[in-house]
Image (spheres, rainbow, N blue to C red):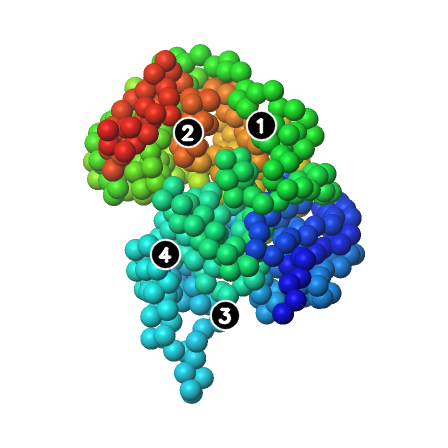
Amino acid sequence: MEEKEYRIELEHISKSFPGVKALDDVSFRVRPGTVHVLVGENGAGKSTLMKIINGLYKADSGKIKFDGKEVEISDPVSARKLGISMIFQELNFIPHLTVEDNMFLGREPRNSFQMLDKKTIHRKAEEFIRNEGLSYDPRTKMKDLSVSDMQMIEILKAVSSDASLIIMDEPTSAITQKEVEVLFRKIEELKHRNISIIYISHRMEEIFKIADDITVLRDGTVVHSAPASEFHTDTLISYMVGRKLENTYPQKTNVPGEAVLEICGFSGKGFSEIHMMVRRGEIVGLSGLMGAGRTEVARAVFGLDPHEKGSLLLNGQEIRIEHPWDAVKQGIVMVSEDRREYGIITRRAVQENIAISSLKKRMRGCFLQKREESRAANEMIDLFKIKVPSRYTAIENLSGGNQQKVVLSKWLLTEPEVLIVDEPTRGIDIGAKFEIYSHLIQLASQGMAILMISSELPELLGISDRIYVMSMGKITGEIGKEEMSQETIMRLATGG
């Protein structure tokens, strides 16, 4: 059979939404058996372009060719029939179904009576998981897995679908280093089978490790597309943001003061005997490998999960937190690593998402003062430079970075003393990361106590005043500014 020059070709694609032009005359093509990395700041149009390929959106103009033939991709079913599979950054699964049921959803094997063949589903899922060197139980319900495990199952689901084009949107944003290595080996195997990969990532080391070609989107247009060998980190960042970033991390202006939050002997599911302290005006990093217990500690402090023993002190006084609203009333708030599940209400407007946690401040008797709500929303949109056509736009239409700014805005309106941020820049581009760092440093300089959980070591080293490291549910070390290094953190994170 004649080999086609391109697996997929998008020609002069444009797409508009109310108040914004998401894509403007975009042409994009991918060669068979290659990894084509698509980069750009949040809001550049990457997800919109991928959703057009996957049939979730229909382009206003332009055409698509697949294996040399012009095609109409009207919905995800027609995309799948062509051989297109997509791994979404925002996880796409049914929580109350099992791992194996999610893996084969929509393509379930059936017996001669056209009934679901549960034995075959289980056998195939078990074989596939085992062949990838992983140890998931296929009969576990998705809701009982960690975010890392859920992400890995979504990856397995896509690569097991016999697709000839797989779109991967930030696939490594929530998985362990071991699982990243499994994924990269799988990508190499897929390339040898002549399968094409469109790979979206903000991680520079990943991009240059696996890319054959790179296309840069900015403000809905293609600004450069070329073989990966023609780029290096500085030029790629310059194309993405339209300017040269002199510094990855802002200059720090905060000066730590007295203790605000003290965690004393905390023990619970996944952690034990945790002792930590965060001072006023201080950014404290919390590091460790996936599964070390970092998020579990934060969730217990915020009242999302119970703890078995230990106490919390706020400004020297013992406090009791059994529910997140207890924490909010005491002045402790948390930005979760899973913003879609715990941070936003997807179908509601940006204004409503910003205002929801501080509604009592805008109530007069039983009535909400809408003018005050609008004023507060506009103030936060301006402060965080949230890119949105209108404060009435549904938050699900915003990029990941802008959604994260909305979540921060929501909690800042409660005027907290303590801010816990769990993976605050996961899935966010380098320009938006700089903005988030700037806001965190500014908040610390105003006296807020900040506890930041992050899997990105440069990020921890770049903005933390001190770092605690966890391994297997315990604190294995506390590192001051002078002793901070990636080697020290990794030694403590691995139990050294």
Cα distance between the residues tagged 2 and 3: 39 Å
Cα distance between the residues tagged 1 and 4: 38 Å
Of badges 4 and 3, the one in the foreground is 4
Residue type pointed to by label 3: Gly
202 versus 345 height, above or below: above
Give the secondary structure at mark 1.
helix
Residue 117, picture quadrant: bottom left
The residue under label 4 is 132
Compared across the picture, whether 260 is left or right of 311 comes to right
Circle on res. 457: 2
Q: Earlier in the sequence, mark 2 or mark 3?
A: 3
Q: Residue at x 34, y 70 (%)?
A: 122
- Can residue 142 be seen by looking at this rendering? yes
Of badges 2 and 4, the one in the foreground is 4
Of badges 1 and 4, the one in the foreground is 4
The residue under label 1 is 435
User: How packed is label 2: few (under 14 Cα within 10 Å), some, or many (20 or more)?
Assistant: some
Q: Earlier in the sequence, mark 2 or mark 4?
A: 4
Residue 465, picture quadrant: top left
Find residue 284 and report its horizontal and vertical position in percent: 38, 23
User: Contact (CB < 8 A) between labels 2 and 4?
Assistant: no
User: Contact (CB < 8 A) between labels 2 and 1?
Assistant: no
